[in-house]
Amino acid sequence: MSIQTEITRLQTSRNALRAKAVELGLAQSTAKLDDLADAFDGIENRGAVSATVQEGETYTIPKGYHNGSGTVSGVSGGGNYTLQSKSATPTKKQQNITPDAGYYGLSDVTVAAIPEAYQDVSSVTATAGDVLANKVIVTADGAVTTGTMPSNGAVNKTLDTSTTSYTVPKGYHSGAGAVKLVTEEKSATPTKSAQTVTPTAGKVLAKVTVAAIPAAYITTTDATAAAADILSGKTAYVNGVKVTGSMADNGTVSGAIDGLTQTSYAVPAGYTDGGTVSLTGDIEDALAAI
């Protein structure tokens, strides 16, 4: 026989003894097995109790066990044996129903139904952990039990970039609390340096608006100029790269040709802001001499 079977058998026996002890008013419905043993051991064995009473007399039956063979009888000769009918409502304690003065005994006792406030709790499944702290229930074995479930009330928590999660505490919540995020919107304008847009302490970013590139910043991917195409000392951006010009600045260019030995003038490479190339009078002097 397994240990669990033995435990079940003992519990069944305990419950039977407990029910009988409660019925006899010897113990409470939560009494343990050793308490039940003490209660039944305290019952005095009265054996066969017999008594004879006369009219108007009463006999108190002694507390204890009676084997059922004793008798209580009235004296012969008749007399006033008026009996009384009584009623009683069950209570948590044992009641002794006795006739009022002037009655010889009881003709009957009507025991009312158990009041609605007293329920069969054998189907209860809740334990202390299922019941709010400081609240009381009666468990399936009739024991009065105080709940242990924590009452957390309204729990509130705000999450942000440093606190990204929240562990909901075990227990009861009133439903009035909230776990939330506080959002904000920010804006930024592009600059030559990288920017990191971060939220204000205790908040998270819902949106970041990046403004258009300022007018001073133009895409240079379609530029074709090289250093030689740009005047010396001047700068420009070509395809994202800053270029310093190397084109010579020749200023005002002036030259002369005589038409005899000099028939052309070589304009120097580079930039010129204008100038003149003139023909000398040598060719006219030569013609006049002919």
Image (cartoon, rainbow, N blue to C red):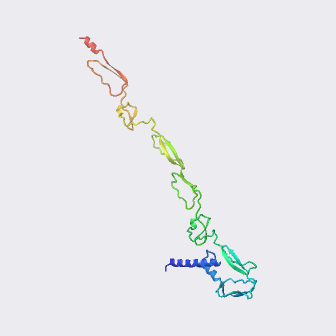
Question: Whole-percent x and y of residue 93?
Answer: 66, 75
Question: Whole-percent x and y of residue 199?
Answer: 51, 47
Q: Find residue 115 and report its image quarter.
A: bottom right
> In what quadrant of the picture does the C terminus appear?
top left
Question: Whole-percent x and y of residue 145?
Answer: 61, 69
Q: In the displayed structure, would residue 289 be above or below residue 111?
A: above
Q: Find residue 177 and report its image quarter.
A: bottom right
Find the residue positioned furthest to the left.
290
Is residue 84 visible in the rendered image? The answer is yes
Q: In the displayed structure, would residue 12 be above or below residue 235?
A: below
Residue appearing at x 58%, y 78% in the figure: 16
Say left or right for 20 vs 97: left
Which of 190 and 167 lies nearest the eye of the viewer?
167
Q: Find residue 146 and report its image quarter.
A: bottom right
Question: Whole-percent x and y of residue 127?
Answer: 57, 68
Which of 230 and 223 lies nearest the eye of the viewer?
223
Q: In the displayed structure, would residue 79 be above or below residue 170?
A: below
Residue appearing at x 56%, y 54% in the figure: 178
